[in-house]
Image (tube, helix red, strand yellow):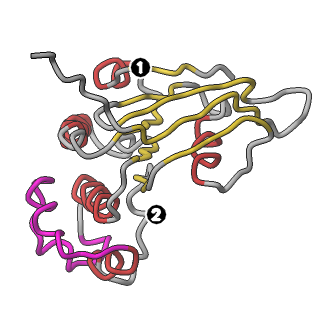
Amino acid sequence: MAKEMCVRESVLSIEGLRFGYTPEAPLYENFSLALHVGEVVSVVGPSGSGKTTLFELITGALKLQAGSLTCKAFSQIFQDPYTSFHPTYSLLEQMAEVADTQEHERLCDAMHLSPALLRRKPHELSGGQLQRASIIRALLMKPKLLLADEPTSALDNLIQLEVMQLLMGLLDEVGILLITHDEALASWCSDSIIRLKS
């Protein structure tokens, strides 16, 4: 019997992208990228090299100057979990504003976070707890593409490793595009690495 080929679902396709803030110095020129469910692609580079600009192009906050970009449903994990939540409402209330929270207890279990913590306000959680809550919010939105912008940079080393291991456990459901300045982290978790220059 012929062995069935496993074709992974495409979640992000960029072809021939061109973008720059000044015509004489484009950040991206004929840039292409492909990402599928089950893959992690890391974008590594110094400040000002265009890492965050790439996410803004994917989310539609910026418009391509040339090329094509298609992506499936996405959600984002931001660099600083304290600024990604409103300070005066509970985490669960804020999650309910953007997603159906029916599965929050299952996701809390997957993230090793007590569901009771989601009924608290952001300042009542540690940085590691709050970043895990940020991941739960992103997953409740049912993405195929997870955009992770320096998701562990605000955490200590032990919590960084734990959060990244939890993210890697999600790859049956999503593809992850990771922005990081940490070459060692990118080498550890990525199927491929895109290195941008300043």
| Residue beneath the point at 25% across and 46% down | 173
Give the left or right position of residue 64, taking residue 118 as reference.
right
Which of 116/34 is in front?
Answer: 34
x, y (%) of residue 30?
Answer: 72, 23
Residue to which mark 2 is pinned: 83
Residue 50 lies in quadrant: top right
In the displayed image of the protein, which residue is found farthest to the front?
Answer: 1
Position above or below: 18 against 113:
above
Q: Name the residue tied to disc 1.
A: 192
Residue 191 shown in magenta: no
Q: Is residue 37 above or below residue 126?
A: above
Give whichever of discs 2 and 1 has the lower sequence position. 2
Question: Which residues, given as a range, are shown in magenta?
Answer: 99-124
* Separation of marks 2 and 1 at Cα, in angstroms: 29 Å
Q: Secondary structure at mark 1?
A: strand
Disc assigned to residue 26: none
Q: For the residue carrying disc 1, how many other residues have a C-alpha within 10 Å: few (<14), some (14-19), or many (20+)?
A: some
